[in-house]
Amino acid sequence: MHQILFLRHAKAAAASPGVPDEARPLTARGGRDAAAIGETMRARGLLPDLVLVSSARRALETLAALEPWEETPLIETMAPLYLASAERIVGILNEVAETVRSVLVVGHNPGLHDCALRLADRRGDGARARLEEGLPTGTLLEFAYGGPWAALGAGPARLLRFLSPRDLTAADG
């Protein structure tokens, strides 16, 4: 059984003149949200073997805020993940070595959301319903997938978890 984790980058600074979109940093809130998601990942044992991260500054800063790792995963910064379509994301995951059990993809909307909708099975649980409403910044998705990486996208994956920074804030108080 493979584990697929999707993490939309955390809250980033608004676009501003003279700053390329790819160079937008996280806001202070985005840094806090990503750190909280990292703590939750560790507490729940959601520790990837491989991390595929967009080359955009906001995605790299989101990944950095997840640290420390109990065991450092292999990290690949990938320019093709920057604003990648759902099809491109699936294509990248199709190339993952079969020996990799768990992959974390840190990326962007709309492609990450579209890809999650494409992969998620149609079971009538709350995670799927929440996913259909959108994929807020800093949200972590967990999927279980029983087939080979090369066949991902041909059949559904089970959406196990939809965890947004707002969920953590609500749980804290």
Image: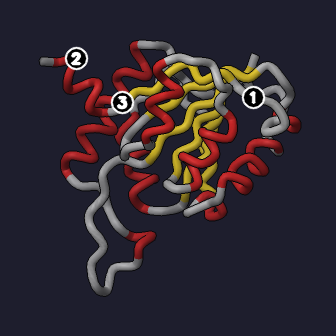
Query: How many residues crowd mark 2 within 10 Å: few (<14), some (14–19), many (20+)?
Result: few
Observer-side mark, 3 or 2, equals: 2
Q: Secondary structure at mark 3?
A: helix
Q: Which residue is mark 2?
A: 171
Q: Nearer the viewer, residue 89 or 56?
A: 89
Q: Which residue is mark 3?
A: 37
Q: Nearer the viewer, residue 129 or 72?
A: 129
Q: Nearer the viewer, residue 75 or 16?
A: 16
- Measuring from the top left, give residue 117's x and y in whole percent: 61, 39
| Disc sitting over residue 156 in the figure | 1
Q: Secondary structure at mark 1?
A: loop
> Which residue is painted at 34% across and 23% down in the image?
39
- Measuring from the top left, give residue 145's x and y in whole percent: 73, 23
Q: Quadrant of the C terminus?
A: top left
Rendering colour mode: secondary structure
Task: Give above or below for 113 relative to 40.
Answer: below
Q: CA distance from mark 1 to mark 2?
A: 30 Å
Q: Amino acid at mark 2?
A: Ala
